[in-house]
Amino acid sequence: MGDGITRMLFYFALILLVCNAPYSDEQQLFSLIRLGRRKWMCGQILYTFLANVIFFIIGTLMFFPHVGFSSNWEAIIVTLSKSEYGKTAGITQEVLQAYSPVKAFLLTYSLNILIGFMISLIVLLVNMLNYHVKGSVVAVGVVVISQLAGNYSEVLPWLNFISPISWSSLDIFAAKYTNISIIYAYAFLIIMIACLLKIIMIKNRNYVMQVKGDF
């Protein structure tokens, strides 16, 4: 996730996956009637969260069989970290020194799930609030603005604190030009997700489902 273009493509694909949230069709209407508003929306949120978990698992599996399992950084990774090619891909000596392979994978995976879940909730909320403005358009804007902010973070370090898409790469935490901590990233994402969930559940009380389909 160190390359900015690759990072945006991943999140654009995720937005395409969740662009119709909350999912409205005849089956969902019957589910809403049977379960009630609160349980139905909890199901929508859980589905969206699991979609992120599976999406980033598939994103990891894409690299097989070109990657393997190891508790230590392999020689090719160490060599790449000393070259410009490695730095472009986010493989830096700072990352290798700060994190073991297992820790680096778990942190990257969990951060991407939280970032993706936050973006998915933005899509869901905007779709609920306004039928004329697509949540996917707002989410794409969030991704692009965050990425642009990350591109100028070396000149303006404070931009790191408002560019969550940049946090999907551990290089931003290990780099010397930024003071942002990984604890801040987790805290920010969890608080944002909690706020979005609260707003969604409040809006759900008077949400009118627009059913897609013919009876």
Image: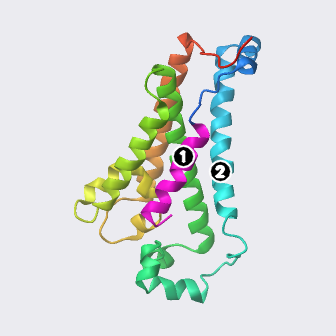
- Check disc 2 and report its element: helix, strand or loop: helix
Residue at image position (61%, 42%) is: 17
Q: Which residue in the protein does label 2 denote?
A: 55
Q: Position of residue 81 (x, y in %)?
A: 47, 82
| Identity, as a three-letter code, of the amino acid under mark 1 | Gly
Q: Position of residue 180 (x, y in %)?
A: 35, 59
| Badge 1: residue crowd in 10 Å (few <14, some 14–19, many ≥20) | many
The answer to whether residue 6 is magenta is yes
Residue at image position (43%, 86%) is: 83
The answer to whether residue 126 is magenta is no
Can the viewer see residue 168 in this picture?
Answer: no
Q: Nearer the viewer, residue 139 or 199?
A: 139
Does 75 sit left or right of 85 as displayed?
Answer: right
Does 91 sit left or right of 211 as displayed?
Answer: left
Residue at image position (40%, 43%) is: 142
- Ranked by sequence position, the earlier of labels 1 and 2 is 2
Please, is residue 202 above or below residue 176 in the view?
above
| Badge 2: residue crowd in 10 Å (few <14, some 14–19, many ≥20) | some
Please, is residue 150 above or below residue 38 in the view?
below
Disc 1 to disc 2: CB gap under 8 Å: yes
Residue at the extreme left of the image, as rendered: 155
Q: Which residue in the protein does label 1 denote?
A: 116
| Identity, as a three-letter code, of the amino acid under mark 2 | Phe
- Check disc 1 and report its element: helix, strand or loop: helix
Label tally: 2
Q: Position of residue 145 (x, y in %)?
A: 34, 48
